[in-house]
Image (cartoon, rainbow, N blue to C red):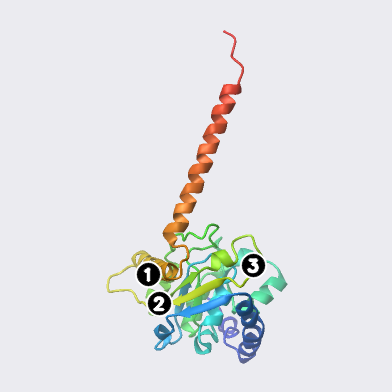
Amino acid sequence: MVADDESRKYTSPQGVAARFAAQQLIMKPYIWSALHVHEHGRRNLDSLKAPFIAVANHSSHLDAPLIMGALPRRLSRNLAAGAAADYFFTTWYTTAATRLFFNAFPVDRKGLRNRRGMAGVLLSEGVPLLLFPEGTRSRTGAMKGFTPGHAALSISRNVPVLPIALVGAFAAMPYGTTRPPQGRPHVHVVFGRALKAAPGEIAHQFAERIYRYVVELHDSTARAYGMPTQADFHRAVALRKAATEQAQAADAEASRDAEPPVDG
C-alpha cells in the first residue's frame, strides 16, 4: 500500500495552488486557443461528487488536457491522471511536469510491485482518477477494448465511473505529432452519465458496458457533426491492412517469378 504521506501530496494546498496556475493559466488557454473545443453533457456532472473514476478513449496527447480543462473546477481540482510509468516517469523533468499539470500517478505497464495499489489508495483518500482503459494511445483513431482494471476499482471501492468520449482529438493531434495543426480543428468532449456496476455484474462485464457506452457517445456526436465514427476508423484500418497484405502477396509472387529455374 502507498504510505499516507505519499497520497497526501495529491491533495496538498500547495499542489492545488500550483495545479490551478498550471492548468487554468497555461494549459487550458493554450489548448482552447489552438482548438475549437465543444463540451457536451455537462448536466450529467451536476450530481457527481468525488471520488469517481473518469474514463475516456485515448488517441492523442490532447486527451488529458481536454478533459481536465472541460470538467468543472470542483471535479478537476484534485483529479489525478494515471500515466504510463515507463513513458512519463523516466526523468525528473517529465515526472515533475506530469505531476504539476495532471496530478499524475504512475501506472505500471510492466507490473512493478512498488507501484501497485496507488489507484485504490487515492480513491480511498477521496481523490478522483482519470484513466484511459485502452492502455495506450490509438495509432489509427480506432478504439481498442477496455481493460477491466477501472471497472474492478469501481466495484471494490464503490465509486462511480464517468464515461467520456473525445471526438476529433485524433485528427487534431494524431500519434507521432507534437502540436495541433493550424486552423483550430474542432474537438468535442462528451460527458456521459455516471455508471455503477449492476448487481452481480463482474469487472469485465462492467468494463464492456462502459466501452460500448463510450463508443455510443463518440459516434452519436461524430454523426451529428459530420466526423468519422468508430466504424469509419475500423473500416479504414481494415482497408489499409487488406491493401498491405495484397501488396505483400504481389511482391512475393513477383519474387517467385523472378527466381531462375533450378537445374534438374
- Mark 3 falls on what kind of element? loop
Res. 108 in view: no
Q: Earlier in the sequence, mark 3 or mark 1?
A: 3
Place of residue 163 in the rendered image (x, y in percent of width and height, measured from the top left): 42, 74
Looking at the image, is mark 3 or mark 1 nearer the viewer? 3
Q: Quadrant of residue 180?
A: bottom right
* Label 2 CA crowd tier, 10 Å (few <14, some 14–19, many 20+): many
Expressed as whole percent of the image width and height from the top left, the position of residue 76 reads: 53, 84
Separation (CA) of disc 1 from disc 2: 8 Å
**Residue 163 vs residue 202: left or right?**
right
Disc 1, disc 2: CB below 8 Å?
yes
Give SS at disc 1.
helix
Residue 192's tag is 2
Query: Observer-nearest residue: 87 or 118?
Result: 87
Q: Is residue 118 above or below residue 254?
A: below
Name which residue type carries label 3: Pro
* Residue occupied by mark 1: 213
| Residue 75 - label | none
> Secondary structure under badge 2?
loop
Query: Among all residues in the image, which is located at the extreme top?
Result: 264
Q: Amino acid at mark 1?
A: Tyr
**Numbered mark located on residue 181 in the image:** 3
Q: Where residue 107 sits: x, y (%)?
A: 55, 68
Q: Which quadrant holds the C terminus? A: top right
N-terminal of the pair, mark 3 or mark 2, is 3
Residue visible at 65% across and 79% down in the picture: 30
